[in-house]
Each structure stands twice: as C-alpha cells, then as structure tokens.
Amino acid sequence: MKPLARCKAWDPYLLAVLALSAGLGLYQLGWGLPNGNHSWAADALGPLTVLSIARRSLTQWNSGWFYFKYPLGYPAMLLASYAPYLAVLMLNGHWRHPATVYPYGFTDPEAALYTMALIGRAVNVALAVAAVALTYGIGRRLLERRTGLLAAWFVATAYPVVYYSHTTNLYVPSLVWLSLALWSTVVATDGDQRWPYAVLGIAVAMAVSTKEQDLPFLIPLIVILLICKRRLLPVTLGPWRRWWRATWNAQMRVALLAGLVTGVIANNVLMNPQGVVNRVLNLTGHKLPGVTARLTPVEFAFFKGWPKELMYGRQLVDRMESALGLPLFLVAVAGVLFVSRYRSRPAVYLLAPALTYYYLALRTHATQIALRYAVPLLPVFALCAAALCMAAMAGRWRRLAGACVAGLCLLSLARAVEMDLLLQHDARYSAEEWIKNNVRPGSVVEVYQQPTYLPRLARFDVREVPMRERSIGGVRARRPDFIIISSAAKMGIAHRWNPDWRRGNTLVLEQSAARAFLDALETERLPYRRVAHFAQRPALLRLLVTSLCPEISIFQRVAVGDHSAN
C-alpha cells in the first residue's frame, strides 16, 4: 500500500460516484408525500413524531420518559435539521402556538409537515453520500485507491442504501456512524495524531445513540486500536504497564471525552438522566410501571443448536444476496476468502467487526434477520468484492476480468435505477388515481392496516377498524362502500402482536374471527367484489423490504342479488 503522503489527495472519479449516490437518493425524494405525519416507509420517523419526542424529552426535568423504539440520537439529528425551518415559521407567524392536536399550531399544517419530511429525507441522502465516501476512504487506506472507488460504487448502488436514503429510517445514519468509526480507527492506527481519536469517540457515541445493537460492531475496533498502540510501546515496560499505557494516554482520553460529551448531548442526559436509565432497564427486560411497549424479540446464547444456527446463516446469505444481487454476492463471498488469506490487515479491520456484529447482534433476533439489520455489513462485503476484482484485473486474464467487473458495475447500477423507478411507479399511485376516478367523495372506505402500506385516502371517510370488530358479522353490519387491503404487512389484518413473544414463543397471535373474515373477503363470499388490483413486478431486484412494491386490492360492496348471481 502506498504511504498516505504519496497518494493523490484528490480523486475526481470519487466525485462522480458521490454525485451518482446523491442523484439516486434525490430522485423521487417525495415518494408518497405529502401524507401528513405518515410515510410509505415502515418505521420511518415522521415530523410530528420527532416534535413529540422533543416535547417529552426537553420540556420537563428528569421525567424518566424514553422513546420505546430507538435512542434519541437520530431524532435529535432530525430535530436539528428542522430547527431553521421552524424558526422561520415562528418569525413569520406561521407557527405561533405549538400544540399536540391538529393543526399543531401551524397555519398550514400540511405544507409544514411536507417540508419537514423532505428535509429529513434530504438529511438521509447526505448521510448515504457520506457512507459512500467513507467506504472509499476505508478502501483507500486499507487496500488502494481503485479498490476503494469500486467498493464505493457497489455501496452507492446497493438497493437498500438507495431505498433508505429516500426515508427517515435510521439505517443509513447507523451505516454512516459505523463506517466513520471504522475509518477513524484505520486512520488512528496509521499515525499518532489526536483528531482521529476524537472522531472515533464521536462516531462510537452516535452509533450507540442511534441504535444500541450497533455496539458489537464497535467493540473489535477498540480492541484493534489498543493492540496496535500496545505494540508501539517498549517491551521493557512489561505486559501490564504496556496495556495500561495503551489504554490510558492522551489520544484515548481525547476519544473518551469526545464520546462522553457526544453521548450526553445526543441522549439528553443532563435534562433527563432517568429516561436513559429507564431505557436501559426496558431493553434488558425489566418491567417498568406505566410502560406497555411489547418486549423486543431478542435473545442471546453462545450456541442455539445447529438448526437455529443454520437458519441464521441461511438468512444472512439470503439478505446479502438480495441486497447485492447474486453475481456480486458470489464475488463478495469469494472476496471474503481472498482477503482472509492474502490481506491480513484488511481482514482484521473488516471481518472482525462484521463477525462480532453477526454473532452478538444479528443472531440475537428470536425469529429472523431482517434485511435492514444487515445494512452495516454492506461496506464490508463491497470492499472484499472490490479487493478480489482488483486482484483479478491485475492478473493474467486482466481483460476478461475487466469486462466482468464492468458488467458487475453496470448490473449494480441497473438495479439501483430500477429501485428508483419502483418508487416512481408505486402501485399506490395507480390505486389513488383509480380511487379518484371511481370513488365518490363521501364514500365510506374501510381499512385494517397502517397508512404506511395503503394509498393516501385523506379525501374520504376512512374507517380504521380495530381487531375486535374484524369479523364477517361486523362488516355486514357496517356495510362500508369500499374495502382496501395491501399485500404489505398483510398478516396484521388477522393477527395481533404478542405483548411478550416469550409466551407461546411467537411474535403474533392469530384472531380466528378476523382470519375467517379475510378469507371470505378474498374469495368473494361476502357481498364485496374485487374491482381493482394494482401490482409491480421488479425485473432485477428480489425485494425484502416490506414497504416496497405492495399489491393493492380494492373491494366494492355489491347488491345482494348481484353477489348471489356472481
């Protein structure tokens, strides 16, 4: 590897890759908007959710309140991005008296929520570009410039990165902080400056403040840093003194201070220390008075038995193959083996955090590894694939290898473009157009799923029917004009979450009356006929994101005589 001082300080090709990443993220940035506080992305943080978190976190001293889903790091980032816009609204008199009910103190709530949603998504686009740049930086430091550039291309065009940059989900921010921690560790071990340690402390604190499950990825980085610092110390100091000096020195104190300050600010510790304590207690399974959030389905064991361990392995393979595409995934797997055997330093820096993240985070999920949880592994797979590609292009069959690598790049780009086109032609847009042309204003529309998975129905009388009323008799008594269902999260129509997944060892509990109703509706044994169905069929992508490409079915009530004839 070239010494850093001899490497080019500026890479014009990197600018092209970063521009590509930004373009893929900005195209269709308004997907599914405006939609109030809702989004077509599952688990995205809406503007009102962020403002509610801020109100409950910042307006009362040591209330003990905590957000049950996530730490406060990412909501705090979104709040900071909203702040200039909210300040302008206050100065102009368009947000005089903030309130918790509609119109929330805004003179034009729909425009305000729409603008804040776009601002939040733009933040994620910028973070996705940063993740691509960090992948390049890691590859350039550990391997060489062209390897970093190729890996950056693979990350920029990976469909989970493209998709989550269009949302206000926390998986792109998580990816950025972990990548920043890895990059700063590599930089810190290459020299003796203090600033990489400060960056590392900030990255570690923000990663844990964004998603606590990221901690296993970070532990090996700190161990690697300590080992590298210990090796630089004189042997005459003795083993224990060398460990002590490697752990407690000016650089490590800078990292610790930067991490503590960042963690305190990101988690609002000074204003609400009990809230931080309560969140930790809740995550560790302790029952807290007044907290009704269902327990997270995670459990750790050193070994869960071969059937379950093999299940986790198959799921990880499936998720990475979906994210990268089969050709690039196979190259990445071969690249992991190549790096493990021929590139000792990159193998340690890349594979150690990936392995601990898999062992201590991914396989703790009780049922399955979701694609979103595996996103932090994308740069590792991309860098290993790029390392193998560069080695092949330097070998005997360099022209053939170059053609294959060009094909991988084009295929990856085509998949990313298809991701954007799927957003542009979302089936819910077609459903909304059909509804606009065929459903009279004032018609009663009945739904059983979250607005995330459905067309936008603000113009109609929409009934969100609770589980206890989802039955054949219930729908016959209510007689809605239309019923709309989505293929996304469809299980939720006839199932409810198990408050404690350990009881019965299942996440969801089937409700027999709702199940009978759904079967009768779909087989048209009720006085409802399917009058429209909208779907998309991806050509290159095998999607594993619930919010993408839902199929929308619309049922219309018919006269009893007409239904009998049918």
Image (tube, grey):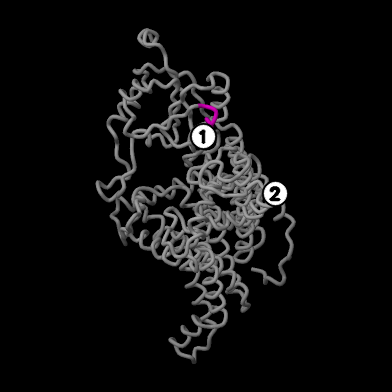
Residue 512 drawn above or below residue 500 = above
Q: Residue at x 55, y 28 (%)?
A: 459
On the image, which quarter does residue 364 sit in?
bottom left
Q: Which residue is drawn at 33% across and 37% down?
A: 495
Query: In screen coordinates, is 439 left or right of 504?
Result: right
Asked whether disc 2 touches disc 1, contact meaning CB atoms under 8 Å apart, the reply is no
Neighbour class for label 2 at 10 Å: few (<14), some, many (≥20)? few
Estimate the x, y position of residue 392 in percent, counting from the top left: 60, 55
The answer for how far apart the CA atoms under marks 2 and 1 are is 40 Å
Q: Main secondary structure of the magenta part?
A: loop
User: What residue does disc 2 label?
Assistant: 92
Residue 11 drawn above or below residue 556 = below
456 or 356, nearer to the observer: 456
Secondary structure beneath disc 2? loop
On whether residue 333 falls in the magenta region, the answer is no
In the rendered structure, which segment of residues is drawn in magenta? 456-460
Quarter holding the C terminus?
Answer: top left
User: What residue does disc 1 label?
Assistant: 549
Q: In this figure, what is the number of numbered marks?
A: 2
Which amino acid, mark 1?
Cys
Residue 188 drawn above or below residue 152 = below
Secondary structure beneath disc 1? loop
Which amino acid, mark 2?
Asn
Q: Which mark is residue 251?
A: none
Q: Which residue is drawn at 55% across and 27% down?
A: 432
Asked whether residue 175 is in view, the answer is yes
Estimate the x, y position of residue 266 in percent, counting from the top left: 53, 63
